[in-house]
Image (tube, coloured by chain):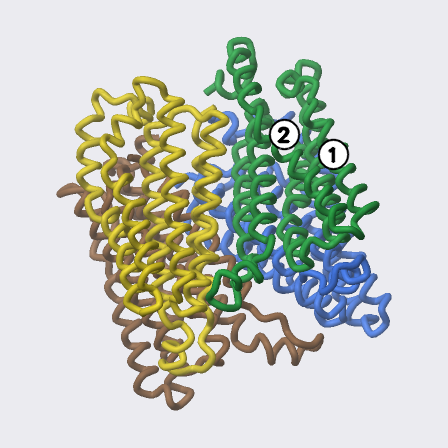
Chain colours: A green, B blue, C brown, D yellow
Amino acid sequence: MTTGRLEAFSDGVLAIIITIMVLELKVPEGHTLSALRHTTGTSLLTYLLSFIYIGIYWNNHHHMFHVVDEVRGGVLWANLALLFCLSLFPFTTAWLDETHLAQTPVVVYGIDLLAAAVAYFVLQSVVIRVQGPHSALRGAVGRDLKGKLSPILYLCGIASALAFGGDRWGVWLALGFFVVVALMWLVPDRRIDRHLRQAVPGRPGRESAG
Amino acid sequence: MTTGRLEAFSDGVLAIIITIMVLELKVPEGHTLSALRHTTGTSLLTYLLSFIYIGIYWNNHHHMFHVVDEVRGGVLWANLALLFCLSLFPFTTAWLDETHLAQTPVVVYGIDLLAAAVAYFVLQSVVIRVQGPHSALRGAVGRDLKGKLSPILYLCGIASALAFGGDRWGVWLALGFFVVVALMWLVPDRRIDRHLRQAVPGRPGRESAG
Amino acid sequence: MTTGRLEAFSDGVLAIIITIMVLELKVPEGHTLSALRHTTGTSLLTYLLSFIYIGIYWNNHHHMFHVVDEVRGGVLWANLALLFCLSLFPFTTAWLDETHLAQTPVVVYGIDLLAAAVAYFVLQSVVIRVQGPHSALRGAVGRDLKGKLSPILYLCGIASALAFGGDRWGVWLALGFFVVVALMWLVPDRRIDRHLRQAVPGRPGRESAG
Amino acid sequence: MTTGRLEAFSDGVLAIIITIMVLELKVPEGHTLSALRHTTGTSLLTYLLSFIYIGIYWNNHHHMFHVVDEVRGGVLWANLALLFCLSLFPFTTAWLDETHLAQTPVVVYGIDLLAAAVAYFVLQSVVIRVQGPHSALRGAVGRDLKGKLSPILYLCGIASALAFGGDRWGVWLALGFFVVVALMWLVPDRRIDRHLRQAVPGRPGRESAG
């Protein structure tokens, strides 16, 4: 079974998640800038953060299935588990907004981030196990520093919100951790691309097949 | 007429159904864990159940059209009938949540599950009839034990809710039946995959063509 | 420019239109069958009607682009005009429901149906003009009896609602006309398919190319 | 990395944006034409304007990636930035409607248009830089008169609304500028197509490959 339809379905779900979050942006009650600021509050920023996160997951998903040629049962369900965690983003982001970044919603948002990271790691592991000893994905992932660092930073964010969230700065510290993870994934993608391009000659993948 | 666009359209509809259900999750009124528990109630669990059901249908749909090469009129409409039944899931799931799993909504949810199973069976039959005496799908489906058992279990669930739904445990028994069907489809997929892989050499399908 | 992305985009839009209509189904206020009947009213039936209409348009769109190989500017915009008319279905259907099938909303619904039919006819004409004197689509369309009969029946429906809509039966007559058009497109598709299959040897189209 | 999945994902997001705007159309409270006029107001027209804008962006996006063969990191993020700006259209359009085209929402709408134009320009520049000195996109874009004129007209619209928006005609002047840009992109597409077709023989692109 080829990966075409799994990728198409995942693209569809991710495209919908990333877009329906805009439906949670409340239209300001009034026609002034202060109405915009009052109603929208921080929700444009949290929408941007969640948008970037979904974008990162789409990007990584895209890269991962670039070196996958075959789909078997376990991969389908691990992929659905990842999509489920990501599908909760509109919900957790909306709660964040409506409570003006209160402590518990920030913790729940962090747990959703953590769950998605774990689901992604499980999906990656299932694919590597299915691919067997000469897994192309294992080679592409390498030591997976960012993949290992992210959950730790999420946990730091959750812990900050739990410990100091009564004060506002505990919440901001937590969100700072989440932003740092996003930036970490945004920035050095180019290095991986270069590595992939160098490896193309000897790498079993879809490019060489197509 | 090849199956490409029918699969793409079905993927799109299923991706939207599975994702917009999250819009039915009410954002908690308050910023505490108890507000989350009070407002969200069991809706995270019913969302998960419906998510898994749509995932199972996508998975089976994916497998079915793997051994279909040609689409004719009847298949298109049987497929649309299936999509219609599945498109009601956000509605029936939302009613389930808002009534905190009351008797009638549980029965209606069961009827929707049953209708989708019947529509799937009809689609399968139409495809087999179109494929003629050497139908590849008939071979892949085999005795279709799970396909025959599912409607019976749905009926058991509906009957439980009707007979004992005045008491809470009647409702839980009904939901138990629905969960059992979902687990039944989740678990032994691997066996079918193995069977399919063994059968690949002599099987007419898209893999051998592509 | 090939038709791939235009078809994918149209599939996406149609899949979303057909699915988000379910979001307009109000969840019953109460947990009884009579609450379901009271709140949902006729909206399940109008949802089904609109679902079938979008399904018919998707089906016809699918058939049309089967004999189109190249897309140029005019086709893109004619296609977008069709999608715009169809995208209003969730809106016109919702108004129909909330007013319990009142006169004006039925007229507006009919106008939307008529507008979509006109847009489809324009799209078809643009494609035929672009294809030139040996247009494959012109051959496939033939005398286009159904395409010419549909707008007339829509106009009959609109006129019925305008003339007799003060009485309930005028509204029902109008809806009857709309249902008849839907049935007309649902039923004899098989004949066209057969015609297409017979014509395949000498027909320039995508099948012969792929 | 080929452009297939990036195009599919973008198609998905654009299809959803263009369609969910219809969810912002309020269903009239009442069953008369005047209720329709009162509730819907200008929102059908602003929906049409935003629909056409998304259509134009989809069309241009379609043309752009027609001469792109390879996707690298920077292109992915520039594309996501464009999608983010476009994803705000349902929000800015809804604010426009609910305030009956008040001054500030018109300015914000113009800023969103401007942001999308800038994001598109950035995406175009990133692609040209990635393609190197013999960029096929640079040749196709040419002097890019329309691309340079559009932001100027958006700025004129924003300035009109800021300067004269207290009077109603300032707002209408601003919307006039936005409509002019849309018409500018709608009309002379045919010239570009002809230019592209003439250039096909010597042009490196996907058509010559496929």
- State the separation of the CA atoms marked 2 and 1: 11 Å
Indicate the position of residue D10 as horizontal and vertical percent values: 45, 40
Indicate the position of residue D123 as horizontal and vertical percent values: 40, 33
Q: Chain of mark 2?
A: A
Mark 2 and 1 residues: CB-CB less than 8 Å, in contact?
yes
Q: Chain of mark 1?
A: A
Q: Residue at x 43, y 51 (%)?
A: C13
Q: Residue at x 43, y 57 (%)?
A: C55
Indicate the position of residue D61 as horizontal and vertical percent values: 36, 38
Which residue in the protein does label 1 denote? A153
Indicate the position of residue A29 as horizontal and vertical percent values: 53, 68
Foreground of the two, A68 or D70: D70
B102 in relation to A203, above or below? below
Which residue in the protein does label 2 denote? A184
Foreground of the two, D153 or A86: D153
- Give the class, few, some or many, for how many residues have Cα within 10 Å of label 1's Cα (few <14, many ≥20): many
Q: Is residue A108 left or right of residue A28?
A: right
Image quarter of residue B178: bottom right
Whether residue D156 appears in this view of the structure is yes
Instruction: Name the residue at the left extreme.
Output: C133
What is the three-letter code of the residue carrying label 2? Met
Instruction: Name the residue at the bottom extreme.
Output: C167
Q: Is residue B68 left or right of residue B63?
A: left
What is the three-letter code of the residue carrying label 1? Leu
How many badges with numbers are in the image?
A: 2
Q: Residue at x 56, y 68 (%)?
A: C25
Q: Is residue A84 left or right of residue A166?
A: left
Q: Residue at x 48, y 71 (%)?
A: C94
Foreground of the two, A21 or C37: A21
D169 in relation to B54, above or below? below
Q: Secondary structure at mark 2?
A: helix
